[in-house]
Image: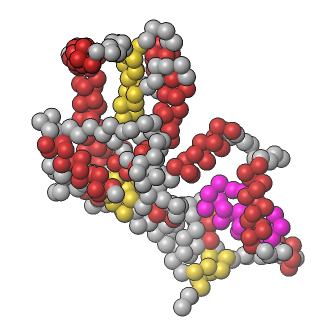
Amino acid sequence: MRSALYNRLCEIAKEEESGVALVETAGGVLSPAPSGTTQADLFRPLRLPVLLVGDNRLGGIATTISAFESLRLRGYDIHSVALFDDHVHGNLQYLENYFQYQAVPTIGFPEPPERDLDLRKDEVALKAYYSEIAKSQSVETLLQSFQTTHLKRVEDLQSDAQKAHEVIWYPFTQHQGRSLKDILVIDSAYGDNFDALKSNDTNSQETGILQPSLDGSASWWTQGLGHGNPELALSAAYAAGRYGHVMFAGAVHKPALELAENLLRMHKNPKLQKVFYTDNGSTGMEVAVKMALRAACARYDWDHTQDDIKILGLMNSYHGDTMGVMDCSEPSTYNKKVEWYQPRGCKFLSE
């Protein structure tokens, strides 16, 4: 579907003198396409820049802001908002102030003339209206801004590798001999793919500067459900909106309680009766090692101040970047040059 949409838009752009393809959706941003998929999700893999047409009628403020938030939730860039200025409900003035904080310009247009029952007169009046609007400064400013923003986006994408090469020190990356072509510039991600800048040798304005790149590592094994999943984004937004941040010491909230109950129920192991939450994989390993050592000392009456305790592990193992779990592994490229490293991991040869 993505390829079909992309190819069709490229064909239209080539046919137009301006080289621009315009996608006009029908209904609201969450209106269904023929397939049943919402239009916002249908076009999301292409991440097209958006001109959001706002609603100037009663209730239009809520409709416009809801559409804006639905698009932002899916990773769209909303370039600007346009709507009629009816001077009655004041929607334009309110939305101008609202979107100012979102760095999104809001443009107002005069309302079209009242409909004339004489179809000929109505056609003449509308043509005159559209002709005047097309030549207005607002439309000229909007078009120039769209063009400027697009060129800036392309410029940024093409310079990001150089900038990153100068200011970022990448983890798990051999920097010696690395060149700009080794840096993957990602514009967005959706499903199983990154939308990434083509390498310089294949970059062509004729065929576009972005191409889908399969995320074969699943972003270090954390994207099993795909990138840009709207259900996950909505759940995360709901959690952020409901709780923000909770200091998890002597407190509880429903999602944490339900997750703990589900984990214990799914394991069906009577020895597992409690859940401990920690921050990430590395600190999770630290917690597990501390729990194991405390349990072993209590069970076997070890005196940790006297006994030299080792951790049994696999060769070439890696558990994380914090000091404790680095010590658990045998010397390797991940730890042996760290000044504080004291190897406590015993080699265990796996078949």
Give the image location of residue 71, x and y in percent.
46, 39
Residue lying furthest top in this view? 87
Position of 86 compared to 314: left or right?
Answer: left
Which region shows up in magenta? 272-294
Q: Looking at the image, which residue is at 24% across and 35% down? A: 151
Does residue 277 belong to the magenta stretch?
yes
Does residue 44 belong to the magenta stretch?
no
Q: Looking at the image, which residue is at 65% across and 44% down? A: 239
Residue 44 visible here: no
Residue 280 visible here: yes
Residue nearer the viewer, 25 or 163: 25
Residue lying furthest bottom in this view? 351
Number of callouts: 0
Q: Is residue 349 above or below residue 81?
A: below
Task: State which quadrant residue 142 falls in.
Answer: top left
Residue nearer the viewer, 209 or 345: 209
Q: Looking at the image, which residue is at 49% across and 28% down? A: 64
Task: State which quadrant residue 113 falls in.
Answer: top left
Q: Looking at the image, which residue is at 78% across and 54% down? A: 257
Give the image location of residue 149, x and y in percent.
29, 31
